[in-house]
Amino acid sequence: QDSNQYQFGRTKIFFRAGQVAYLEKLRSDKLRNACIMIQKNIRGWVQREKFLRARNAAIVIQQYFRGQRAVRQAITATAIKHAWAAIIIQKHCRGFLVRRIYQLILVATVTIQAFTRGYLARKRYRKMREEHKAVILQKYARAWLARRRFQNIRRFVMNIQLSYRVQRLQKKLEDQNKENHGLMERLTSLAAVHSHDVDKLHKVESELEKSLTQRKLQEEKGKKYKDEAEQKISKLQAQNAEFMERKQRLEVQLEEKTQDMKDKMDELTNQLFTDVEKKDKQRVGLEKQFEMQKKDYEKQIKELKDEIEALKAKNKQLTLQIEEQTRLSDRLKLEVAHLSDQAKKIPGFETQIEDLETQLKESDNQTQIQKHEMREKMSEMAKQLLDSFEIEDVKNRLAQEDLGNINEDGELWFAYEGLKKATRILENHFHTQKEAYEKEIELLNFKVNHFSDDIKHIQRSLKEEKETNGVLRQEITRLMSENKIIASLHTKISDLEKQNMDLQGSLYEQNMKKPDKKEKLFNHKNQQEEEENMSQKVKKRHLEQLETDEMKGKEDGIHLTEQNEMHIEDYAEQLDKKDRIIKKLQDQIKALTKTMETENQINVPSVFKDYLGMLEFLQEDEFKLISNLILDIKPRGVVVNMIPGLPAHILFMCVRYTDYINDAERIKSLMNASINGIKQVIQEHADDFEMLSFWLSNVHHFLNCLKQYSGEEEFMKYNVPLQNKNCLKNFDLSEYRQIISDLAIRIYHQFITVMENNLQPMIVPGMLEYESLHGISVAKPTGFRKRSSSIDDTDAYTMTSILQQLSYFYTTMCQHGMDPELQKQTVKQLFFLISTVTLNSLFLRKDMCSCRKGMQIRCNISYLEEWLQGKNLHGSAAKETLEPLSQAAWLLQVKKIKDEDAKEICDRCTVLSTVQIVKILNSYTPIDDFEKRVTPSFVRKVQSMLNSREDGSQLMLDSKYLFQVTFPFSPSPHALESIQIPSSLKLGFLKRI
């Protein structure tokens, strides 16, 4: 407080020395006292709170304890019972009172509700009655107005019709007079024609009487022609009578109509003056139409003449073809002579066979049974060849037949169709036999090559091991089954000589019968040409019989061509049979000569090799292997006569060799090169369906081989013990399996896109636009203008084109050996595409939402389901992908009027969303006026029922969606030791170990 101890400055306070320390001491003392005071109060409050809590707890404990003690002292069991009984009485009493009050309230509310509901119902009934009466009044008023308007229009139309009919009847009178004159002229001409025809018939009868001694067939033809001429005359007479009756009827009708019209003419003359000019124009148009019809008839006559000339030209061509057949028969003679020369060379081989028999005398006892079996097989083969070429049937066909009876009741046409079917069956039979013989020849050639390799190996081993005679004896017994070829040579040569002799005899007999058949054909042609000339004259004279005579002339020409074609086809069938038999004989002779040459070289029996199922290759040949096996290979050249997945098996056998020699660098380079090669092929042929299918199948087979021979127990349990020996020994290729699996998925996606691009343009035209249900109206819905089709009519796709495309996809996958489960996944994806694209187009095109289109879609879905059953793909879940489309088709066909219909729609259409159902109902358009439209109230009703559903608001479906693909493990049944490499793959640098 002393002012001398401090002094105020401008911005600071200045203290004397020691004054600041003194002030700090004072401040610290005050702070210390304040802290002590705060601590005192807080500690006191905490202790007080503890004490109060303890005190309250003690009081509560004492309270409960004292209360329990007082209750025990004061309350007895009887008191508790009385108290409990009083409570129950009170409960029942209070419940009774409350129930009585509730019943009073309930009765009051029910009466109030009854009166209010009755009032509302009466009010609603009055309103409906007023509306109904108003509707009835409107109905009768509108009907009266419509009747009055219709009567006015009817009067106007009747006046116009009367005026037009009067003028038309006047014109008909003039036309009838002209026609009467024309009919009289026609009758005179027909009488002249009739007399001329009768004269010709007498001439024909005289000619037929002269030819009775020569052939009975011509008599029957003459009778037929005579009957036809009499029928024509009777028809002409009947037509003349009809014309006369028509003329009389028309005259009577004209007289009656003229009398009726004269009465009406007086009343309608005033109205006719205004319409005369219009009717004159119509008359000129009718005259022009009459002239055009005349020109059309003249054109038809010219066309008939041209057709007759064309038939004559065909007859000339047929004669030329018969001459060519004779030339072919001469060529056949030369070929048979050449075959006989070759057959003469065959006995020269008998000396060589005897040499071979001397070498195999020791093994005759064991081979006699095998010889007997082979002789029986060859005799069966010879019988099949001779049965397929039955000479007696050919003789019966080429024998003289009653050519006049052939053409009765269209028998010639049925015979022609039967011959066609028979020729197809024979061709299929010969194709199968040819393929079987070719396979046998290939097997024989393969055995010969195999024997030659084994002989070389044995000759080397004989130089080193001359003392191992016991081993050679065992090898001789092992090769007795392969020596069947030598024993069967005798039977083959004898059968070939017999077949050559039979062929020469049948050819000689057929050549002797051909001239008689030519004469019959030429006589038959001349007779039919005369008949055509007769029919032409009748056609020119009588215009009304043009159509019937034209049909008869065409039938005669068709019968001529059919008869000639039948004879030509008989010759062609015989020539084809002979050519096939000759080719088979030549192939068998060549095969026999080859086997004889190889057997002459064999001096020591061969030995089977035990292969390890590997392919040895040099490191320098790796690029050549990849280029020949992957880059340059063509699917069509590999699929035929080969096991499925052959490139994959060959590649895995090379991988086994690198694992066998334990070379990590080579196996790594081979796997990388093969994967890169497959990627390059897929990239270069990104749009080639066959190439993608081929490599998808091979990659899957390669992946299965890597799993099957990996040595893992889960895959080894499917193997044979011999296959378990071929497992990989030194390397684990599980990482490469994942890479190859990813590559297979990539190929699959590309494969699906190519199929979708090929199939998508066909879906909308085939499923929606094309009408496969015949007999249903194809008119467009009312209120739509004509659309220009997106595809020309000539190139329009149909449902059959979709099925053909699917069949092409399926057969290609089967040819490439694709796994059945993978095929089912691809078919499921394609059916999903068909369903989504069709539904999206249905949502966008209002003209396609009709009952007729629903029937069409249902029919197309049934075609797809039949295709699935025919291919045994009903377990592929592809049918479920068509369920939305099936429900949409059902929705278009079902009734859409009542509440029950709305409920049925909600119950049945479970796959379609609410937006899609409402869109179809709003887009529904009736085909004609008899079908009702879908009312907006019905659509709202369906929409309200479907509001409880939890589905998306998306209308369009995603057609690019891809299902998840899985590559199932299917072990290969082919043993690696038995796989042969064909020469067409150009892999001669690979060596089997």
Image (cartoon, grey):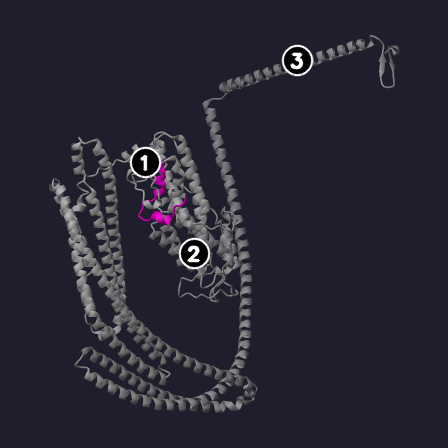
Pick whichever of labels 2 and 3 is earlier in the sequence. Answer: 3
Start-end of magenta stretch? 631-654
Q: Quadrant of residue 664?
A: top left
The rendered magenta stretch, by its main secondary structure, is classed as helix
Q: Which residue is mark 1?
A: 614
Q: Quadrant of the N terminus?
A: top right
Disc number for residue 890: 2
Q: Which residue is mark 3?
A: 43
Residue type of the residue flagged with mark 3: Arg
636 relative to 971, above or below: below
Pick whichever of labels 1 and 3 is earlier in the sequence. Answer: 3
Density class for disc 1 (Cα within 10 Å; few <14, some 14-19, many ≥20) is many
Element class at badge 2:
helix
78 relative to 269, above or below: above
Element class at badge 3:
helix
542 relative to 460, above or below: below
Residue 352 in picture, x, y percent from top left = 16, 47
> In terms of depth relative to the viewer, which is nearer, 929 or 498?
498
Disc number for residue 554: none
Residue type of the residue flagged with mark 1: Met
Element class at badge 1:
loop
What residue sits 15% from the left and 52% below the top? Answer: 347
Residue 730 in picture, x, y percent from top left = 36, 29
